[in-house]
Image (cartoon, rainbow, N blue to C red):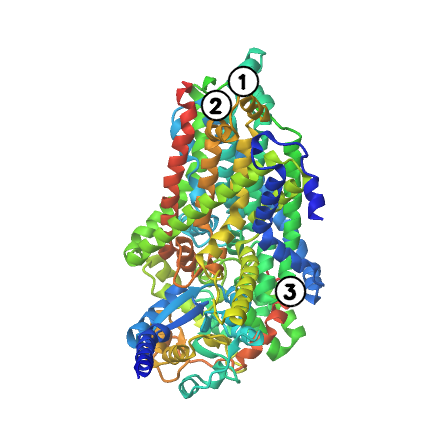
Amino acid sequence: MLAAVLNSVHPHPISLAGNWSGRSWAVGVCAVSLLIALPVIVIASFVAQPAGEVWSHLVTTVLPDYVVNSLILAFGVAFGAAVIGVATAWLTATCEFPGRRWFAWALLLPLAIPAYIIAYTYTGTLDYAGPLQTALRAFFGWQHQDYWFPEIRSLPGAIVMLSLVLYPYVYLLARAAFLEQSGSIIDTSRTLGYGPWDSFFKISLPIARPAIVAGVSLAMMETLADYGTVQYFGVATFTTGIFRTWFGLGDSVAAAQLSGVLLAFVFVLLALERWSRSRARYHHGGHRPQSRRLIRLGGGRALAALCVCAAPLLFGFALPATQLLNWSIRTASDVVDGAFLELVVNTVLLAAVTAVFTVMLACFLGYGRRLVPGLIVRAAVRVSAFGYAVPGTVIAIGVLLPFAWFDNRLDALLQVQFGISTGLLLSGSVAALIFAYIVRFFAVSFNAVEAGLAAIRPTMDDCARSLGYTPMTVVRRIHIPMLRGSLLTALLLVFVDVMKELPATLVLRPFNFNTLAVRAYELAADERLADSSSAALAIVAAGIIPVIWLSRSMQRPDRGGK
Amino acid sequence: MIRQSFNGLFMVAAAIALLNMQPAIAAEVNVYSARKEALIKPLLDRFSADTGIRVNLVTGKADALLARLLSEGVNSPADVLITTDAGRLHRAKTADVLQAVDSTVLAAAVPAEFTDSDGYWFGLSMRARPVMYAKDRVDPTTLNDYEDLASPEWKARICVRSSDNIYNQSMVASMLIARGVESTEEWAEALVANLARDPKGGDRDQIKAVAAGQCDVAIANTYYLAHLLNSDDSNERRAAQAVAIHWPNQSGRGTHVNVSGIAMTRAAPNPDQALQLMEYLVGDAAQTWYAESNYEYPVKLGLGLSPTVAAWGKFKADSVSLSRLGEFNSRAVMLMDRAGWR
């Protein structure tokens, strides 16, 4: 069976594969993909179990709500993140207006704020019992139901919160795409009589579409996996449903079956993304991006551009961070101590190590897919991205089951053969935790790496090879310089995501091991928002450093643009 | 001769090695806790200081910890499981990951209604879930039982958190046991119809909403109100002072209560130390800590309460077996699904 599958891969030797044959690549890619997909496969295998009484109860009562709310939420966030992300990316990449350079990196800042934390801060301010509405009531002498005020803890509220922290995914990938677009295309379109709007909608946007779609699909998957925000806002989605079924009804099979339905959603989503990309495979021309000229905005248009960029930054970062800082000043003296420092170190190390591993694996699979254009390899790589839309707790269980099974088997075997007990080797170790992060965030790094690889035309490889470059030289001299931005993006995204990750960390971490997210959550879940703010602020602060580093290195290509 | 002394030397060396190893093996206990770190670590630190036994801690959601116990099986490093409700302990017992503990200290300290009848788990602290009302808008004599919150006079005046929450699930389970499915479901439907807003946020949120005038009564655990009353934030203190507690069902089955509790795992590698920890946690020092730092009720009788809690007076607690709440939990959740309690 496997042999037949492998025979179906590209039969011709592939120029870049060098000493590695296509078959070795295919085996390697399939093996790594399956390992990364293992937890999701474990969960999906539950779906095969017969549906019980609980399942029919879910179908007749709450399942329709879960489906409708999850769809509205996912598409709402997709729209919000796309509009904010594309507008700001295009402005900072192609227009000149006051503050452009500063916005270019600052617009990434909301990425550092966990979604449930921004939800807590806005609720603290905008809720009925919060300071704003209380002041309004006191000022106008209103009573309950005398006035209308948007309810922050609602489905639209959740869409706004998630859009505000997830648009940077779109922004990052779209901006990289806009920056890489050859200026000559825009110039040509302008000489042919296109105005700026026409050249944006008819040229820039279509060329950047693969990157935009990749960013939007990341935002949608993150939305589908979100638990903290929707739970706090009382919005019944698949995620809250999975937890309710598992914890409240105590039915892990029905919970896994709900996860299976969620996976079906993701499958459709990813298929749409593929379809959209396959219809538009653009490799831009040979002009160096440096040749691009910025569109100079003057007067009112510059001001408008400034406002468009300032708004998401204000609402997605400045306001919530100020609220956190306010709380933190009040409580830091009780909360920040030596143990807190240890939390920071744990968190940053864990995030950095995971980011490096994840990006290495993403490169491996990215190249595998490029070099071995078989259907099976493509499918295997696809499956490895599923983890991103699965709630962290579900991933954690998917990691726990096979690891503990392996540990217990190994222990039993060694006991019988040699009288040695190994106990649990992998379960409850940092390695298991890192593996879970890789499973959860693989899609993030893979999408970025793949978008980068897509920009390198295959003909470039062929040219370089025909000029006598070895495969390694091609990678070193051509690919790495061209991929640098994408690799850095992938590293940053995984780093920040791991720092914010909570549910899988809660389930899998070893004894006496905590992260900032765990600390922030434990206090926030106990409704001690003020006490949790220092840990939340530390996540934000630790996330800002790589954001700045990333954006500085991403700005290098357009430094000569003026 | 040489061989004998060699043997002797070997024995001595082995004995020394064993003695050296003893403290390393003995002085440890591993805790899986659904009580959050801030609400258990200080006690565990004291235990370590008093006994020299090192405590290793992982916190998390009870069901996730239970899943971890189940998958780790016979090699699980965990010695004890601590949860914030009896239902989860019952679930763990049913899943066969616990072992019964026979301890006169535990039996003497924890009243029978707060332990498993077979000795599989023991309550550590009691939590009560009464009705809270706005002092300026509600006449407490019009409040009676939980059941009365279903009457039309409370239309659009009630706040309660989501039915995802275990405290609500246990409360509905207790009513299910007392009144049966039909009557409880009618009650839940009427309660949902009386809500001032869709369920959202936690217990503190409900209390703040009462203080702010969005609703007139709420159902919440008492320690949340106590935390607000003792907050550093003057706004929170002021809000909490506008709210009072009504103990429902005093002429009937009593106000709904639950416990946070502890159990020894079946695979416990350090059962002696685990038992020492369990006995320590029902000791006077630990029980007083629950009362003073988290405003809970000690399960051990005759100990002082925090002044805030003492001011609310004595009340009659529902004496239904907490194991039964665990048994009825999933039925309660399904009932709330049907009643549209989000």
- Badge 2: chain ID: A
Residue where numbered disc 1 is placed? A186
Place of residue A457 in the rendered image (x, y in percent of width and height, measured from the top left): 57, 25
User: Does A372 sit above or below residue B277?
Assistant: above
Residue where numbered disc 2 is placed? A94
User: How far apart are the alpha carbons under marks 3 and 2?
Assistant: 55 Å
**Residue B171 is drawn in which quadrant?**
bottom right
Q: In the picture provided, is B221 more to the left or to the right than A64?
A: left
Given contact means CB atoms under 8 Å apart, are the residues at marks 1 and 2 in contact?
Answer: yes
Tell me the SS state at disc 2.
Answer: helix
Residue placed most toward the observer, A202 or B12: B12
The residue carrying pointer 2 sits among few (fewer than 14), some (14 to 19) or many (20 or more) residues within 10 Å by Cα, namely many
**For the point 39% across and 40% down, which residue is it?**
A546
- Badge 3: chain ID: B
Which one is earlier in the sequence, the residue at label 1 or at label 2? 2
User: Does B23 sit above or below residue A355?
Assistant: below
Residue placed most toward the observer, B342 or A93: A93
Residue where numbered disc 3 is placed? B339
User: Does A6 sit above or below residue A123?
Assistant: above
Given contact means CB atoms under 8 Å apart, are the residues at marks 3 and 1 in contact?
Answer: no
Place of residue B202 in the rendered image (x, y in percent of width and height, measured from the top left): 48, 61
**For the point 67% across and 30% down, which residue is it?**
A279
User: Does B31 sit above or below residue A276?
Assistant: below
Q: Is residue A236 visible?
A: no
Image quarter (top left, top right, bottom left or bottom right) of the C terminus of chain A: top left
Place of residue A50 in the rendered image (x, y in percent of width and height, measured from the top left): 72, 63
Residue placed most toward the observer, B189 or A531: A531
Place of residue B185 in the rendered image (x, y in percent of width and height, measured from the top left): 65, 70
User: How far apart are the alpha carbons under marks 1 and 2?
Assistant: 10 Å
Q: Is residue A369 visible?
A: yes
Identify residue type, mark 3: Ala
